[in-house]
Amino acid sequence: MERVLITGGAGFIGSNLAKKLIAQFEIVVVDDLSMGSKENLPLSENLTFIEEDISEKSVVEALFSTYTFHYIYHLAAIASVADSVKYPKETHKVNMETTLLLLEAARTQQKNLKRIIFASSAAVYGDEPALPKHETSTIQPLTPYAIDKFSSENYILAYQKLFAMPTVAVRFFNVYGNNQNPSSPYSGVISLLVSALQQKNPATNKPFTIFGDGNQTRDFVFIEDVLQALQIVATKNEALGRVFNVGTGIRTSLHDIIRIGERISHTKLVLHYKPARAGDIKDSCADITALKTLGYRPQFTILNGLEKYWQFVTT
Ligand code: NAD
Ligand code: UD1
């Protein structure tokens, strides 16, 4: 059986990936549980969970001398943009230096690799207003998080050119779905919305806060479409050494997702408006032509994606 490493595999995207791959691969998850949770992971003798900080050189070296990997999904990151602004040095260690650490260690210690996949972000495009964002659109990273993602991407792609390593990067837009952690005020807005809708009587609970006028738009992409994208970049040779947007190509406003969420859950939220967050972008949307040419076909609209997410959290 081939072996897969998922860094950050106890988190939202990583745990869904582990669930999908478990039937086919032996899986090793390394996660320090700073944001993820062991309960997200499937129980299986094919899955080994290692609670460690992947930004430590000794951890990576021990891991690579113990296991031979065929696929590495590097998803571990401090995914909160706000934290990166507050603690740039600490987040830089995880969000950028760890990418280089893994690349160097893999170059010298892993000889059977078929793919290293790096999770970048639409945040690299910044707030330049032209839409949709093509992979060649202006890059304007505005936060330490985005700078680190862009820098990591460049290392990932350079290692393919310099050392013929089988690397690829994906720029996720706004991913939502099962296992997304709503515990921080900076968690993904759909996880916060679903958590608010689950309250028995929203009228007596805290109102749902909208930062800005609620008309901001995002390309919300359901986790299952993200898994489809990851499978494509992990298997198609044309993907090597390239970066791909992962979204749906459709943008939806915050007001619209709230309306849809209320309809699905038969709940009415009390909305509270606050000024837009500093650095918040108004609109975001992916051009997904590049990934489509490799066969990607997003299957979920915001309506059926939210329905499926709602079913998951309520049953
Ligand atoms: P997440 O926070 O749920 O998962 C990240 C995981 O990494 C967590 O389980 C956390 O505990 C772990 N982690 C953090 N620092 C670590 C360390 N030093 N050592 C080991 N584990 C560590 O986030 P997610 O939404 O699943 O995101 C996965 C990746 O995709 C991240 O790199 C994120 O930046 C990127 N991304 C996500 C989105 C999105 O919409 N969810 C959008 C763009 C990019
Ligand atoms: C998200 C990701 C970021 C990623 C980027 C890529 C998260 C937490 N952030 O940032 O890692 O790089 O997409 O596109 O997944 N909002 C409210 N009320 C709330 C929470 C948010 O009004 O309670 C607003 C925000 O101000 C923003 C919008 O909802 O305008 C979306 O916010 P969020 O889900 O945090 O996503 P991004 O900021 O786009």
Image (cartoon, rainbow, N blue to C red):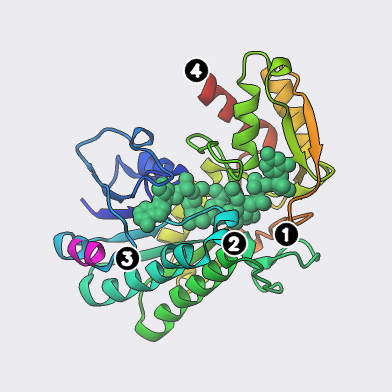
Circle nearer the N terminus (3, 2): 2
* Residue assigned mark 1: 279
Labels 3, 2: front one: 2
Three-letter residue code for mark 2: Val
Residue in view at x 67 percent, y 13 percent? 201
Crowding around mark 4 (Cα neighbors within 10 Å: few <14, some 14 to 19, many 20+) is few
> Does residue 117 sit above or below 152 in this rendering?
above
Circle nearer the N terminus (3, 4): 3
Residue in view at x 21 percent, y 60 percent? 63
Circle nearer the N terminus (2, 4): 2
Labels 1, 2: front one: 2
Mark number, residue 114: 3
Labels 3, 4: front one: 4
Residue 20 counted in the magenta span: no
**Label 3 element class:** loop
CB within 8 Å, label 3 to label 1: no
The answer to whether any part of residue 162 appears in the image is yes
| Spatial CA span between label 2 and label 4 | 37 Å
Labels 3, 1: front one: 1
Q: Residue 27 location in percent, x, y? A: 27, 48
Residue 61 counted in the magenta span: yes
* Residue assigned mark 4: 315
**Label 1 element class:** loop
CB within 8 Å, label 3 to label 2: no
| Spatial CA span between label 3 and label 1 | 38 Å
Circle nearer the N terminus (1, 2): 2
Residue bounds of the magenta highlight:
58-62
* Residue assigned mark 2: 85
Three-letter residue code for mark 4: Thr
CB within 8 Å, label 1 to label 2: yes
Circle nearer the N terminus (3, 1): 3
Q: Residue 44 location in percent, x, y? A: 24, 35
